[in-house]
Image (tube, rainbow, N blue to C red):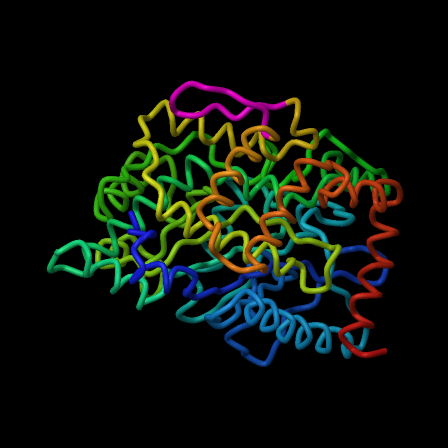
Amino acid sequence: MLHAHDESVRAHLLEGGFGLEKESLRIDGGGFLAHTPADFADDVHIVRDFSENQVEVNTPVCATPAEAVQSLEHYNGLVQRAIANLPERELLWPFSNPPYILGEKDIPIAQYFGDDVGKTAYREYLSDRYGRYKMAFSGIHINYSLGEELLRADFALTGGDDFGAYRDDLYVRLAENCVTWGWILTAVMAASPVMDSSFVEKGKIGGDLFQGLATVRCSELGYWNFFAPILDYTSAAAYADSIQSYIDTGMIRYPSELYYPIRLKNFGPYSLEGLREGISHIELRMVDLNPLVRAGIDERDVLFSQLFLVWAASTEGPRLAPKDQVQAVQNFKNAAHYDLKTVKIVQPDGSAQSVVKAAKRLIDQMEEFYADFGESVHDCLAFERRKFDEPESRYAWKIREVFGQGFVARGLQLARQRQREYLGE
């Protein structure tokens, strides 16, 4: 783990790289999914996710949370202007949970051709295995890389001679710690408590559903495989091999099919071979779209993600036995609930606390760790703590209050407002 209290390391502790990936559904003015082809002038930062009508914005690597959110705003604006200028104006749906769905054909698979035709085949496989409804959820992924000077300063203290192996081992241990404690990120960024009835009953549009969840997408109803993955965190190669074992046994067909809140990423296009050659960053996949802010994510949540990752990279967490990894999956699902006082986090040592108590205990540790940092860090930690001290300050509680009745109709009003903000209308 990082030698975080050595001055040569601490001076660079919050240096790193941020990249945001934001998915959004294109809709028409009535709240139905758009059926027009995506066309964003081949901008490499604006692509498609599962569906042809699911826009994905990928920011370049940015040096700070503020820069990352500003970059996301820029590309959001490009998308908004493009769809506003279509012959029939479209909107971006601002929630993780989809609006009206008429049926599976309402979620058209993204079409690729030529050398990329395999991308469509992969989506057709996912459609058959998991159904298209689940693929209609949208979210944000936060990608984070520890700063080069930080890693070099820390490596100098190890006395080692293989920087690549050092870096890979650090990221693997960070990922294991995120499995232990990353549920807190689900809890603080949960923002999808309500949904339309058409998601659970085909063709029944216009009903408002609340299922006791703060984030449906991250709950047991959302993005998970049919099994709790047990991964090997002893080395980068072992980690890649453990994913390969699920492919070899037919549990999944592709590495990217492993639906897990934490993912290690390699340099270049994602592959298990690339992971064995070198880890470049870590990806957090449990973030809901936040409709309460224009960008879709609050800058303070991006900063908190960084503070959490750096703290986790500096803390000697427990090594996880298979039973601990199974429990960790349940911890993530429990953190997706609406009332966090009624569900538990079970730690590897067997101790159990409500999500609220476990979260405040974790933030206590982070506050002690960052005691000598500036006001912005302390304000961020206080902002996140309030979500557990005052449940009504959580995004899910606010969203249920405003959008819990007339979800799609009120969501359409917000979608139009957001577009006007981007267009300056």
Total marks placed: 0
Q: Horizontally, is 321 left or right of 367 in the view?
A: left
70 or 414, which is in the foreground? Answer: 70
193 relative to 270, above or below:
above
200 relative to 254, above or below:
above
71 relative to 23, above or below:
below
Q: Which residues are drawn in magenta? A: 343-355
305 or 240, which is in the foreground? Answer: 305
295 relative to 249, above or below:
below
Q: Horizontally, is 193 left or right of 38 in the view?
A: right
- In the image, residue 18 lies at what x, y percent? 47, 64
Residue 171 is a magenta residue = no
Q: Horizontally, is 98 left or right of 275 in the view?
A: right
User: Which residue is pictured at 28% across the width and 40% down the height?
Assistant: 233
The C terminus, quarter of image: bottom right
126 or 192, which is in the foreground? Answer: 192
- In the image, residue 126 lies at what x, y percent? 50, 46
Extreme residue toward the front, this view: 372
Q: Horizontally, is 40 left or right of 162 in the view?
A: right
- In the image, residue 383 lies at what x, y percent? 65, 49
User: Which residue is pictured at 39% across the width and 29% down the height?
Assistant: 325
- In the image, residue 314 lies at what x, y percent? 35, 47
